[in-house]
């Protein structure tokens, strides 16, 4: 059986990230947040756009004021007032100054700003009381960015800073990768939707809802196919339908060794290549990963048959599917799972047979991560104590015991609270 690391490497190798213009869409800045940039961006504008003042004060010629002091102030004639957004009308000559405000364009002739706190205004003149540094408080055109040079690279996620940069250079329609489509369905004769009457022996399908949200959180588009009974022909049809429509298919249930577990067999029948059937992990041992031959668009859909147990399905998603979706999305880096080292607040004991994930809460206490094990049963059938989980503590085969107060690796699956 594959180890967790082997499975992770194999899965990431199977992922073909979106690339090529056929996978692009062009979005306005209000729609592009969280999306992945598809091409290098070069702006047509310098930044700053023009020489401007970083402070409120007076635009002067440095040579005029370099020798002044409180004892020997220099008096300059004020020729005009330049608020932000205004085009200066005059050139500053020797013996002159322009009143200027933060962000306003430097007038020609002036090369230095004297901040207003170091001056004394007298009608139409100003006394400079302290000699400034040459070119003080002038933000020069193109000092931060030169037009035509690359500013953002493909594979970057567009968050607030990147959107501000794009707005600044007036790049208002940006090429981003389309969202990968992820088809999701649940298998099981026993399953009913949450809104349906629960008859004896039936179980409510929770996986589809949890997985749909996780898929959206990864920036992908969930495509819900519904509940599929454990009947080979229906299952085969559902798989074929999902594969035709999606980049990735997530099914849950039916991948174990029971008589009604048909997923692997149907994948075989449909010509898929099965790369993984089980991983030495707890919860989540039965895990099927398969690829289909490339479709017309050149994509070979990636199939994850997740275990049906709700806890196992979620842990498998967090550990194996999430990095794959992030890589697929075109993100150039940081696909991988996010591990933090935390101090465990309880003893954690695994059986040493498989890498074991214990769910609970990560907190920050005085700058240090702490892990609090969820109370109650850690059976993979219990999803009730999964609420508020933001971390999975990892007990390896080599180190199946972590004592309270010792450090443990934790897979972070949601923001730390
Ligand atoms: P399976 O992997 O199909 O053997 O299912 C394992 C266990 O998970 C069984 O108890 C199922 O009833 C339960 N289960 C399977 N699919 C779901 C689902 N979509 N939602 C909730 N429980 C499920
Ligand atoms: Mg089943």
Image (cartoon, rainbow, N blue to C red):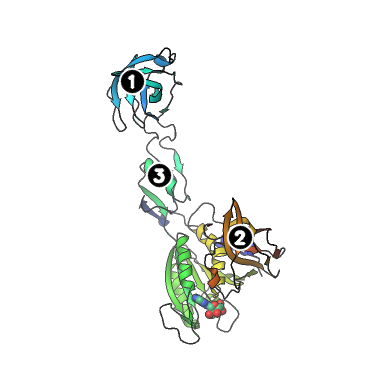
Residue farthest to the right?
Answer: 398
Label 1, label 3: how many angstroms apart (C-alpha)? 37 Å
140 in relation to 298, above or below:
above
Residue farthest to the top?
Answer: 72
Q: Which of marks 1 and 3 is nearer the N terminus?
A: 1
Report the residue marked by disc 1.
121
**Label 2: few (<14), some (14–19) or many (≥20) C-alpha neighbours in 10 Å:** many
Q: Which of marks 2 and 1 is nearer the N terminus?
A: 1
Residue 5 location (% of width, % of height): 64, 62
Report the residue marked by disc 2.
371
Residue 415 location (% of width, % of height): 52, 57
Residue 180 location (% of width, % of height): 45, 61
Name the element at disc 3.
helix
Tell me the mark number nearer the camera, choosing from 2 and 1: 1
In the image shown, does 176 or 138 lie closer to the viewer?
Answer: 138
Q: Earlier in the sequence, mark 2 or mark 3?
A: 3
Quadrant of image for the N terminus: bottom right
Q: Does the residue labelled 3 lie within 8 Å of ligand 1?
A: no
Residue 202 location (% of width, % of height): 49, 84
Label 2, label 1: how many angstroms apart (C-alpha)? 62 Å
Q: Residue 164 carries which label?
A: 3
Tell me the mark number nearer the camera, choosing from 1 and 3: 1
């Amino acid at each position: 059986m594959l180890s967790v690391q082997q499975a992770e490497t194999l899965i990431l190798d199977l992922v073909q990230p979106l690339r090529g213009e056929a996978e692009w869409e062009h979005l306005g800045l209000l729609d592009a947040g969280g999306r992945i940039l598809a091409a290098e961006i070069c702006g047509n504008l310098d930044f700053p756009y023009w020489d401007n003042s970083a402070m409120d004060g007076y635009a002067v010629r440095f040579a005029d004021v370099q020798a002044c002091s409180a004892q020997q102030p220099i008096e300059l004639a004020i020729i005009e007032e330049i608020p932000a957004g205004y085009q200066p009308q005059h050139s500053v000559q020797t013996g002159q100054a322009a009143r200027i405000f933060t962000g306003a364009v430097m007038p020609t002739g002036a090369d230095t700003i004297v901040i207003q706190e170091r001056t004394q205004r007298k009608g139409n003149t100003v006394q400079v009381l302290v000699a400034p540094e040459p070119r003080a408080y002038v933000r020069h055109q193109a000092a931060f960015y030169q037009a035509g040079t690359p500013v953002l690279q493909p594979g970057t996620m567009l968050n607030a800073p990147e959107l501000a940069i794009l707005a600044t250079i007036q790049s208002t329609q940006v090429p981003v990768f389309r969202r990968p489509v992820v088809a999701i369905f649940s298998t099981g004769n026993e399953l009913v939707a949450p809104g349906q009457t629960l008859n004896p022996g039936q179980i409510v399908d929770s996986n589809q809802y949890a997985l749909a949200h996780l898929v959206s959180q990864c920036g992908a588009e969930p495509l819900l196919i519904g509940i599929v009974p454990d009947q080979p022909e229906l299952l085969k049809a559902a798989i074929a339908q999902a594969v035709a429509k999606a980049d990735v298919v997530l099914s849950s249930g039916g991948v174990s060794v029971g008589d009604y577990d048909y997923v692997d067999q149907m994948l075989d029948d449909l010509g898929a290549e099965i790369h993984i059937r089980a991983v030495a992990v707890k919860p989540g041992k039965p895990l099927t990963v398969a690829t289909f031959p490339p479709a017309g668009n050149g994509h070979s859909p990636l199939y994850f048959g997740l275990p049906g147990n709700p806890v196992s399905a979620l842990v498998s998603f967090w550990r194996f599917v999430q990095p794959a979706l992030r890589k697929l999305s075109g993100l150039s880096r940081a696909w991988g799972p996010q591990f933090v080292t935390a101090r465990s607040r309880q003893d954690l004991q695994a059986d040493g047979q498989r890498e074991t994930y214990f769910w609970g809460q990560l907190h920050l206490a005085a700058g240090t991560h702490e892990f609090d094990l969820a109370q109650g049963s850690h059976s993979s059938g219990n999803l009730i104590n999964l609420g508020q989980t933001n971390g999975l503590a990892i007990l390896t085969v080599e180190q199946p015991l972590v004592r309270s107060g010792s450090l443990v690796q934790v897979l972070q699956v949601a923001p730390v609270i």
